[in-house]
Image (cartoon, grey):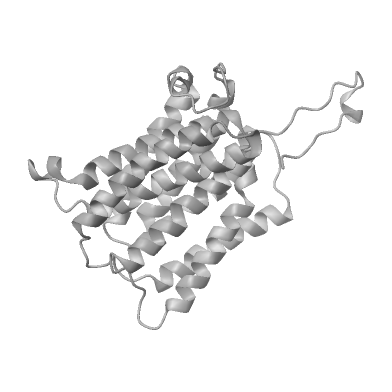
Amino acid sequence: MICALASAVCYGTASVLQAIAARGAAPGTGSGVDAALLLRAVRQWRYLVGLSLDGAGFALQVVALRTLPIYAVGAALAASLAVTAVVGARLMRFSLGRAEWTAVAAVCGGLALIGLAAGPEGGRSGSDALRWTMLGAAVGVLVVGAAAGRLPARPRALALGLGSGCGFGVVEVSVRLVDSLALPGLLADPALYALLAGGAAGFLLLTSALQRGSVTTATGGMVVGETVGPALIGVVWLGDRTREGLVPLAVVGFVVAVVGALALSRFGEPPAPPPATGRGPRNATRRRAT
C-alpha cells in the first residue's frame, strides 16, 4: 500500500506538470488525436519531469499490483487527483475551499477503509483468453480514441479521458497476467504486448485530452476507466478478495475514494485568466475552474 500511495503522489504531480506542458505545446491541425503532440510536448522540461515521475510511479505501481488486489491499487491511484489538487493549487495559483478539502479527506478515508479490508492479491493467474482480450482491448482503445478525437469539444474530452483510463486499466490487469520475466517465454506472452500497447494508448489519448478539451472532464473519465473495469476483472477473473467478512467495508471505501477523486478532478484545470477591464487588480475578477 505504501508503494501504491507513493505511485499516486508521482502520478498526481506528473499530471499537473503535463497539463501545463500540453497546454503550452504548439497546437496541431484539426481536433482529432494528434500523435505528433507528444513530440512537441517533450520539448518542454515540465513534460520531461512529468514523464520521469510517471516512470517512477509505474515501477511503484507494478510492485503494488504484484501484492495487492487490483481494486485497492486502482483506488489508491485515483487518489492521485488529491495530489493533483494540492500541487495544482500551488503551481496554478488557485486555492482549495472547504468542499475541496472535504473531498481530499474523503479520498484518504476511503483508502483507509480499503487498506483495512483488502486481502492479498488473488491466486488465479488468468487464462490465455483473458491475455488476448487485454491485447485486443488495448488496440481497441487506440482505434476508438482516434474516432473520439473528431467529436465536439466536451464529449471529446470525456471520451479521450475515458479511453486513456481504459488504456491504463489494461496496464493494471496485464501486470497481473505476466507470469514470468524469463526469456523467451516473456516475449511470447500476449500480456506483455497488451501492457505496452495499453500504456502507449493511454498516454497518447490523455495528452490529446489535456490539450484539446476540459482537463476536468478528461481526468474524471480517466478515473472511471482505470478503476471500475480493472477492479471487476480482478474480482471476477483473478480471484481478488477482501479479508473475511469485510466486503462491505471494501465496497464503501472504494466508492468513497473514487467519488472523492471525481470531485477533485477539476483541479487539473488551469484557472481562466481575469478579463482585461483596464482597471486595477482590485476590480479584476477571477473565475474558478469548472
Q: Residue at x 49, y 65 (%)?
A: 254
Which quadrant holds the C terminus? top right
Name the side, left or right, on which 61 lies relative to 34. Answer: left
Q: Residue at x 38, y 42 (%)?
A: 140
Q: Is residue 230 left or right of residue 265?
A: left
Is residue 69 visible in the rendered structure shown here?
no
**In front: 165, or 145?**
145
Which residue lies most toward the left here? Answer: 184
x, y percent for residue 41: 48, 21
Is 62 on the left or on the right of 287, as rendered?
Answer: left
Q: Quadrant of residue 59?
A: top left
Q: Position of residue 114 (x, y in %)?
A: 45, 68
Nearest the eye: 260 or 143: 143
Residue in the image at 62% along x and 50% along y: 264
Residue 232: x, y in percent?
A: 40, 63
Image location of residue 33, percent across then percent down: 49, 28
Residue 270 in sight from this viewpoint: yes
Pick out the residue farthest to the bottom.
Answer: 245
Identify the image quadrant of residue 281.
Answer: top right
| Quarter of the image where one finds residue 183 | top left
| Residue nearest the viewer, comparing 55 with 211 | 211
Is residue 116 shown above or below 3? below
Towards the viewer: 143 or 38: 143
Above or below: residue 50 compared with residue 115? above
Image height of 103 relative to 146, above or below: below
Q: How many marks?
A: 0
Q: Quadrant of the N terminus?
A: bottom left
